[in-house]
Image: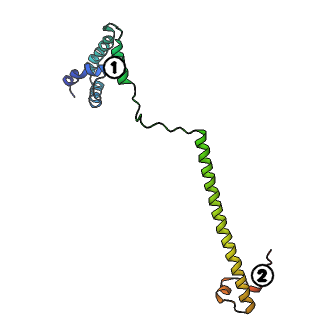
Amino acid sequence: MNCEEAQELLDAYSLGALEKPETRRVEKHLSSCSDCRLLHQQAAETAALLALAAPLRRASPALRLRLRQRVLPRPALNWLPAPRLSWATAAAMLVVVSLGALAWGGFLQTQVNDLKTDSDRFAVLYGELERRGETVDVLQKASPTPPSARRTSRV
């Protein structure tokens, strides 16, 4: 950027009215040009005094209302209320979760009981086979101890 281009943009730069790319270009030029820095300093002083040059007036009620309507955030999705968790809802959710946990525990206990019943049946069948001397070779190969050493008392 040359001095002529920078000087055209200095007033807008002093007011903060330039876009970011233009601002960067002007700042880069000001860092290397003392003449434009002096002009910028004068423009900045003028911009600071500009706010004091206008007389203060009270805004009309209609103008205030228009400004508030534009500035205040509008609530999004008025038709969708924000969820509120009441104590009753929390208690109901706790009851549902507790019942689910109990049902799951009951299901697991049923599984365990079925496995115990199957285990007892196999023990009876294995004992009967052992009594007859018809022990299955697969069971003998799978167990590291002989069948006679595995006998335990059941309560």
- In terms of image quadrants, where is residue 129? bottom right
Where is residue 132 drawn, in percent x and y? 73, 92
At label 1, the amino acid type is Arg
Q: Which residue is mark 2?
A: 151
Query: Which quadrant is home to the N terminus?
Result: top left
Query: In the visual, does 81 lie left or right of 128?
Result: left
Looking at the picture, tell me which residue is in the foreground, 147 or 76. 76
Residue furthest left as drawn: 4
Q: Residue at x 65, y 60 (%)?
A: 105
Q: Which mark is residue 66?
A: 1
Mark 1 or mark 2, which is nearer the start of the sequence?
1
Looking at the picture, tell me which residue is in the foreground, 145 or 96. 96
Residue 100 seen in the current view: yes
Please rate how many residues cluster around mark 1, counting C-alpha atoms within 10 Å: few if below 14, some from 14 to 19, many from 20: few
Residue furthest bottom as drawn: 133
Instruction: Establish if 148 lies above or below 104.
Output: below
Q: Residue at x 40, y 34 (%)?
A: 76
Where is residue 133 drawn, in percent x and y? 73, 92
Where is residue 112 drawn, in percent x and y? 67, 68
Q: Residue at x 22, y 21 (%)?
A: 7
Q: CA distance from mark 2 to mark 1?
A: 94 Å
Instruction: Establish if 1 lies above or below 94.
Output: above
Please rate how many residues cluster around mark 2, counting C-alpha atoms within 10 Å: few if below 14, some from 14 to 19, many from 20: few
- In terms of image quadrants, where is residue 57? top left
Q: Residue at x 36, y 9 (%)?
A: 58
Query: In the visual, does 117 lie left or right of 85?
Result: right
Query: In the visual, does 146 lie left or right of 65?
Result: right
Number of numbered markers:
2
Residue 146 seen in the current view: no
Task: Say which element carries label 1.
Answer: helix
